[in-house]
Image (cartoon, grey):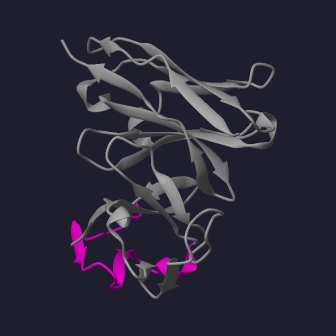
Amino acid sequence: EVQLVESGGAVVQPGGSLRLSCAASGFRFDDYTINWVRQTPGKGLEWVALINWDGTSIQYRDSVKGRFIISRDNSRNVVFLQMNGLSTEDTALYYCARDEDSGYDHWGQGTQVTVSS
Amino acid sequence: SYELTQPLSVSVAPGQTARIPCGGDNIENKNVYWYQQKPGQAPVMVIYRDNNRPSGIPERFSGSNSGNTATVIISRAQVDDEGDYYCQVWDSGTVVFGGGTKLTVL
């Protein structure tokens, strides 16, 4: 069974940092691109970043460029999202999602990030 | 940047057909994906590449994409189909989601 489990969410002050993790199981991890997608309370989905199977292709949405870093460790089946310089605008539920044929066929349950003073 | 436009809400009576549109400039030239999200749950893909159903999704779900509008079509709508529906495309190497449509079946 394919599983994606996010962790690392917390309450953090503006300007702070967090590292999110996405642990994968049930599939050949290094065959897939993994994405981070966030959702603010009561609002829609917003794509954040992606990393291809070997980490050689990475993309970010403009609002997080220079602050967030996505990486992966294929030996541990984990994708990370290092988030620096956090602002209240980054408050959201963060999902990781597996990219299958350019759509997301499996999602985790999300980890909550709250940026507040 | 590319934008996708969805109505805030769509209502349909049980047993009738629901159509949820997603507007975008020449969207017919892109592959469109659709997700259903129920309260407190992660999204679930219901349509990929315009009109294909993932395994486990009922045949009542279908999709179309023409001109500037893609549509997810839910035949014989059931109360269990209620939720938020999001369309998604790729544009210039990044991912774009529509704002979401709340489907009510009553």
Magenta residue check for B16: yes
Tell me if residue A76 comes above or below residue B105 in the rendering.
above
Q: Position of residue A72 (x, y in %)?
A: 69, 25
Q: Is residue A15 above or below residue B54?
A: above
- Residue B39: horizontal and vertical position, in percent? 31, 46
Quadrant of the drawing holding the C terminus of chain A: top left
**Foreground: B84 or B14?**
B14
Q: Quadrant of residue A39?
A: top left
**What's drawn in magenta, residue-wise?**
B1-30
Q: Is residue B67 magenta?
A: no
For the N terminus of chain A, the image quarter is top right
Tell me the residue at 43%/33% (across/down).
Answer: A94
* Residue at x 55%, y 59% (from the top left corner): B92
Residue A96 place in picture, x, y as percent: 54, 36
- Whole-percent x and y of residue A87? 28, 23
The image quarter containing residue A27 is top right
**In this rendering, does residue B6 appear at all?**
yes
Look at 29% across and 21% down and name the residue there.
Answer: A114
Q: Is residue A58 visible?
A: no
Q: Would residue B42 appear left or right of B53 to someone viewing this image?
A: left
**Residue, far left:** A117
Residue closest to the far bottom: B67
Left or right, A100 with respect to A70, comes to: right
- Which residue occupies 39% across, 61% down? B86
Q: From this view, report whether residue A106 is shown above or below residue A29.
A: below
> Which quadrant of the view contains residue A112?
top left
